[in-house]
Image (spheres, helix red, strand yellow):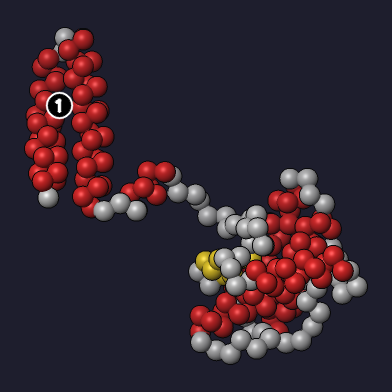
Amino acid sequence: MNKKEFLDDLRGALKENNIPNDIIESNISYYDKYITDRIDKGDSASDVLSELGSGRLIAKTIVDAEKKGTGKSTSYGTGDTSADSNNKKSKSRQSKRNANESNTNGNSYGGTYYYTGPNNEYSNTSKPKGLFKVLMENMSTKAKIKTIAITLLIIVGVVLVLGFMLKIVALMIPYIILLLVLGVLFRFVSRR
């Protein structure tokens, strides 16, 4: 099986199950890019395609995800779901993949289901979050205020030290006031 056959198989299986065209095209684009990226990284096309299995199996995961979202039946048409029905290695990978399907092997983004494989070796192409954003999402409001206050205190402290070293006292007055306000705010939050 080559990339074109895989993508045609995926597209056909999705159309058979009445998946909307925008979701079909989104998934075709995703898997086309995935296969191309893996080949660009040095993997052979046959290895990448055998890891994915058949387009019908991936279509089944997409169809199931779509049906779960709408509460409809998850029945799926028949067909060969292995990359090569005569290939024992492919069947082994296929059964391993089926066993892992209940884990977090796929992610749904805006109605599109991206299968990431048993080892989650490829994920969606969304922009990664920065460390500060991740920390702020997982903190309580009190912890956020403390973190921001400490960061501002450090910045103001550095500016004050540089100001004294350069003898620019007139420019430091707003920073001194800000430092006092932050100190009061920090004490207020610490007592809560």
Locate residue 189, reporting x and y percent: 14, 45
In the current view of this chain or complex, which residue is farthest to the right? 86
- Amino acid type indicated by mark 1: Tyr
Frontmost residue, 12 versus 66: 66
Q: Residue at x 62, y 58 (%)?
A: 120
55 sits to left or right of 156? right
Q: How many marks?
A: 1
Is residue 97 visible in this depiction of the protein? Answer: yes
Is 130 located above or below residue 60 in the figure?
Answer: above
128 sits to left or right of 60? left
The N terminus sits in image quarter: bottom right
182 sits to left or right of 36? left
Locate residue 176, reporting x and y percent: 11, 25
Q: Quadrant of residue 171?
A: top left
Locate residue 47, reporting x and y percent: 81, 56
Q: Residue at x 68, y 72 (%)?
A: 99
Q: Residue at x 85, y 65 (%)?
A: 89
Under tag 1, what secondary structure? helix
Q: Quadrant of residue 51?
A: bottom right
185 sits to left or right of 11? left
Q: Quadrant of residue 35?
A: bottom right
Frontmost residue, 71 versus 142: 142
Frontmost residue, 15 versus 99: 99
Is residue 185 visible in this depiction of the protein? Answer: no
Q: Residue at x 54, y 68 (%)?
A: 108
List the residue tagged with mark 1: 175
